[in-house]
Image (spheres, helix red, strand yellow):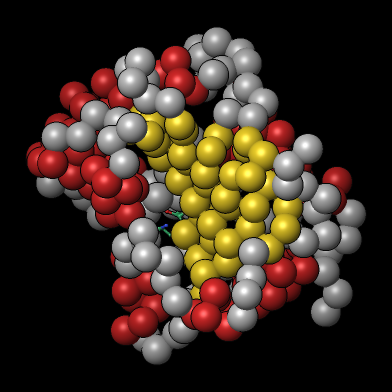
């Protein structure tokens, strides 16, 4: 089955995927009510173009974005390990947002902001060259060819990312889905702004040292699927 061709055919405004899961326990519900407003990015009121450093305290000089953070365990760990980095976490799944908020309160880190809406809609509001790193970990694979246009990685979102990522910034993708990996390796290197950093099979087989296993990765490994780690970089100039 050939790849769906024209980029303009990609429907980037419709977001597939669930927003709510099982009923939240009181503490998680309270986190959404009381803590989310403290860290929520409201895409309708941010000043445009938005320099995301203005969303954080003055000692934050670099900004990393995680798209679809799920339960937030990777984002929480990165935020604690990199207190000088401001993290924007984008996720629409309410239970995942509540889980990240709980980790924030329990561990007491302040360097995260949460976008509880579609990352693709927010990126055009950001200033150019403002993101120093982007994580896309276990994106929904949409395995059927007829759903391929729903995949996050496509030429339209790559254009959006290319504009907001600084030259040399890393786009780190992990997937347990061989077709999604192949899809990325077809879509990303043909985009003029990105190149794949690969030195051999070890590059895609071994989890980067600074990355912890996410919930989806653990599930994949339990179910005997093999994770792949694909590191792309924003070209300079
Ligand atoms: C398969 S899950 C992976 C979650 C997590 N990264 C992990 O590895 O456990 C993909 C997540 O991406 C989120 N997502 C998908 N498209 C998104 C978008 N355009 N903006 C923000 N979140 C998105 C979904 O809600 C879902 O929670």
Q: Quadrant of residue 106?
A: top left
| Total labels drawn | 0
Q: Is residue 121 above or below residue 218?
A: above
Q: Residue at x 73, y 52 (%)?
A: 194
Q: Residue at x 45, y 46 (%)?
A: 66
**Residue 197's x, y, as percent?**
64, 64
Residue 84 in the figure: left or right of residue 133: left
Q: Quadrant of residue 184?
A: bottom right
Q: Residue at x 45, y 85 (%)?
A: 225
**Residue 182's x, y, as percent?**
69, 75
Outermost bottom residue = 224
Q: Quadrant of the N terminus?
A: bottom right
Q: Quadrant of residue 39?
A: top left
Q: Residue at x 41, y 18 (%)?
A: 55
**Residue 81's x, y, as percent?**
27, 46
Q: Quadrant of the C terminus?
A: top right
Residue 161 visible from this viewpoint: no
Residue 123 in the figure: left or right of residue 11: left
Outermost right residue = 6
**Residue 88's x, y, as percent?**
42, 35
Asked whether 36 or 22 is in front, the reply is 36
Residue 114 in the figure: left or right of residue 43: left
Residue 43 visible from this viewpoint: yes
Q: Is residue 56 above or below residue 230?
A: above
């Amino acid at each position: 089955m050939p790849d769906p061709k024209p980029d303009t055919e990609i429907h980037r405004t419709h977001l597939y995927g669930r927003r709510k899961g099982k009923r939240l326990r009181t503490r998680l519900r309270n986190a959404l009510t009381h803590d989310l407003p403290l860290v929520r990015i409201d895409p309708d009121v941010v000043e445009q173009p938005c320099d995301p450093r203005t969303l954080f305290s003055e000692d934050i000089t670099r900004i990393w974005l995680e798209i679809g953070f799920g339960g937030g365990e990777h984002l929480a760990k990165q935020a604690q390990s990199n207190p000088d980095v401001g993290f924007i976490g984008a996720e629409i799944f309410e239970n995942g947002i509540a889980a990240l908020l709980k980790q924030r309160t329990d561990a007491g880190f302040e360097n995260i902001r949460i976008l509880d809406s579609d990352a693709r809609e927010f990126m055009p509001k950001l200033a150019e060259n403002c993101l120093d790193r982007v994580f896309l970990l276990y994106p929904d694979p949409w395995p059927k060819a007829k759903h391929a246009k729903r995949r996050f990685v496509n030429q339209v979102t790559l254009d959006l990312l290319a504009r907001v990522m600084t030259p040399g910034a890393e786009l780190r993708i992990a997937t347990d889905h061989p077709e999604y990996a192949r899809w990325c390796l077809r879509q990303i290197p043909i985009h003029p702004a990105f190149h794949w950093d690969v030195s051999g099979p070890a590059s895609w087989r071994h989890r980067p040292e600074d990355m912890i296993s996410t919930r989806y990765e653990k599930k994949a490994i339990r179910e005997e699927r093999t994770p792949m780690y694909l590191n792309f970089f924003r070209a300079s100039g």
